[in-house]
Image: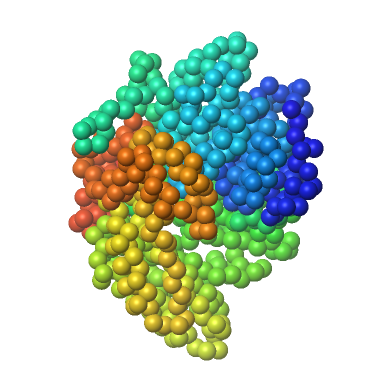
Amino acid sequence: MKMTLKISDNILRNVEKPSRYTGNEWNSVTKSLDKINIRFAFGFPDVYEIGMSHLGSKILYHLLNQREDTWCERVFAPWVDMEEQMRKNQIPLFALESKDPIKSFDFFGFTLQYEMSYTNIINMLDLAGVPLKSSMRTEDDLFVCAGGPCAYNPEPLAEIMDFFLMGEGEEILNEVLDVFKAWKNEGAAREDFLDRISKIEGVYVPGAYQVQYESDGTIKSVLPNKSHYPERIKKRIIKNLEDVFFPDKIIVPYTDIVHDRIMLELFRGCTRGCRFCQAGFIYRPVRERTPEKLLDLARKLQENTGYEEISLTSLSTSDYEGLGDLTENLIKEMEPLKVNLSLPSLRIDSFSLDLMEKAQKVRKSGLTFAPEAGTQRLRDVINKGVTEEDLINSVSIAFNGGWTGVKLYFMMGLPTESFDDIEGIADLGNKVVDAYMRVPKEKRGKGLSVTISTSSFVPKPFTPFQWEAQDTMETLREKQRHLKGMIKNKKITYNWHESQLSLLEAVFSRGDRRLGNLLIKAWEKGCKFDSWGEHFKFDLWMEAFGECGLDPHFYANRKRDFNEVLPWDHIDVGVSKKFLQRECEKAYRGELTSNCRVDCSGCGAASFGSTICTG
C-alpha cells in the first residue's frame, strides 16, 4: 500500500514546516522493496527537528542500511497540526523515506531519550494502527521495541514494548535482525521469536517476567516466568570504539534542526562520577577513538555534507586525552573551508582560552559552564569536583579574551540542599559579574550577559541518588522564588524549570510497570508533547493518576530504603548496587571520589573492558 498520493500538497500547505514530512533529503537512503526482506521503522518520539539532531539515531540509521537485506526508515512524531490532517484524512503514520504505513513494517523501534516523550509513543502507535499493548498484538502485527538511556528503567513501558535493547545498539541490533531473518523464513510463531532473542545478551522481553508487590505498594520481586530467561539482563557495550561503525555521511535536512552540524563522538563514558548524573554511570567504562580516526571521519563528513560546523561530542570533552592534537589538526584543515569547531561539555576546571580561541576562530559564540550547585559543600556532596575558584578563573580568562556571554547551569533540590546553597547560586552570579568588571575596559567586550538556569533534581536509576526523594513541587517553587528574589543585578537573567513537569519526570524515571495503564489513560485524555509547555496538561495527568488509583508522590517524593527492591534491579549496567550505596553514604559525609583516571573506585565497570579501567 503506497501513500505518496494521499499526502497531498493541500495537506502540506495546511501544516507548519511541511519539510518535516517530505523526506528525500541529501544522504537519505532509499531501497527497492523486492531486494530486501526486513523493514525497520526507526521512531523518534518528538518532532523532526529534535529527532534529526540525535547522534545515536544517525549512527543506527546508517548502520542498519548497510545491510543489503534491511531498509531502515525514519518516523517522527507528527506535530499537532499534521496529526489533525492525518486523522481527518485517514492517513496512518508513515515512514519518511517510502511514505509507506508503519503497520506494514517488521519492526517499530523507539529511542527513549526523555521520560516525557512516552505519551508520544502511545500516540504514534495509535496513529500507526498498532495495538498499544504487547499482549494485544497478534501474528499479523509488527514488533515494537526500544532502547536508549531511559530504557535502563524499562518498566513504565514494559506492557507497551515487545522487547528492549539494553546498552549500545551497534552489535545487538544486527544480532536481533539475524535471528528475525531465520525466524521469518521458518514461519514460526510470534512468541517463538521473542524466546529466541531473549538468549541474546542485552535483550529484555518484559512479557516473560512477573512482578510481585508488597502490601505497601513496593516491589517484592521481578522474576522470569520461564527457566531459560535470564534473571538479570546485562547491558551490551562496544568494547573497541575505534573499529565500530560510525557514518561518514549523514542526512542533511532541508529545514533548520536543533543541532544542525557534524557531530564527532570522541569517546563514550565518563570518568568523573557526578552523583546525580545517570549518563556518567550507565555509559561506563570510558572508551576512546584516536585523533587520527576522528580526523579522517571529520574530513569525510564535511565533504559529504557541506556543513560549516563540527561539534566534538562526549560527556566531558575536555577529558579526551588527544584533544590538543585533534583540535590543532582540525583547525588547520577546516579553517580554510570556513568550518567552525564547537566544543560543548567543557569543564570549568579545564577551561583554556587557547583552546576556545582555536575552536571559535571562525565564529565566536557564548560560553556555558555548569557549577551545578551554589556552595562548595553541596558541590562536594554531588562529587562535582570543581571549585568557585575554578569558575571565576575560567570566566575571567573568557572575559579577557573578549567573550561577554556566559550561561551558568545549576540543579535545584539536590540531596542535603539548604537555602544557604540557593543563595550561593545568586552569589556566584554576582561574582561572575564582578570578574567581568575587573577586566580593563579596553580588553573586555561590550554587553555582558550572564544567564543563570536551574533545573530541578530528578533522582535517576543507577546513580548514587537513586534512593533519594525529590523535593515536593511546593518546596521547589519556594526555592525558585527565593533565588529570584536574591538576584538583583540587571546583567543577570534567571530561568527555571517548572516543578510540575519535574514531578512527572521523577515518576517515570523510577516508576514500575503499573504506570503503563497511566500512560494510556493520560493519552486518552489528550496528553502528548508533554515537554512542550503549550501542550503540557498537568490537571489531566492528575486526573489520570486518580482514575488509575496511583499516587505520583509515592514514585517521586518518597525516599527509598537501601534494601528495597527497585523496578530496575534485574538490569545489570556493570556498576554494582553496593558501589552506588557507598557513593550515596559518602555524599552525606561530603566526601569526594577520585576521577577514574586517577584512582579506580571499584564500581564494577572494569569487567566490561575499557581503555582506562584497571580495577
Considering every residue shown, the one lying at the far bottom of the view is 441
User: What is the quadrant of the N terminus in the image?
Assistant: top right
Is 287 situated left or right of 42 in this image?
A: left
Looking at the image, which residue is at 59% across and 70% down? Answer: 365
Quarter of the rendering containing residue 223: top left
Residue 67 or 565: which is nearer the viewer? 565
Is 61 situated left or right of 435 in this image?
A: right
Residue 200 or 488: which is nearer the viewer? 488
Q: Where is residue 388 drawn, in percent x and y? A: 34, 71
User: What is the quadrant of the C terminus in the image?
Assistant: top left
Looking at the image, which residue is at 79% across and 47% down? Answer: 9
Quarter of the rendering containing residue 331: bottom right
Q: How many marks?
A: 0
Q: Where is residue 342 drawn, in percent x and y? A: 59, 61
Q: Where is residue 279 drawn, in percent x and y? A: 42, 47
Residue 177 or 18: which is nearer the viewer? 18
Q: Where is residue 495 drawn, in percent x and y? A: 45, 68
Looking at the image, which residue is at 37% across and 34% down? Answer: 513
- 332 to 35, vertically: above or below: below
Can residue 567 be seen from the camera position used here? yes
Residue 273 or 9: which is nearer the viewer? 9
Looking at the image, which residue is at 36% across and 41% down? Answer: 547
- 260 to 403, vertically: above or below: above
Can residue 348 be seen from the camera position used here? no
> Which color scheme is applied?
rainbow
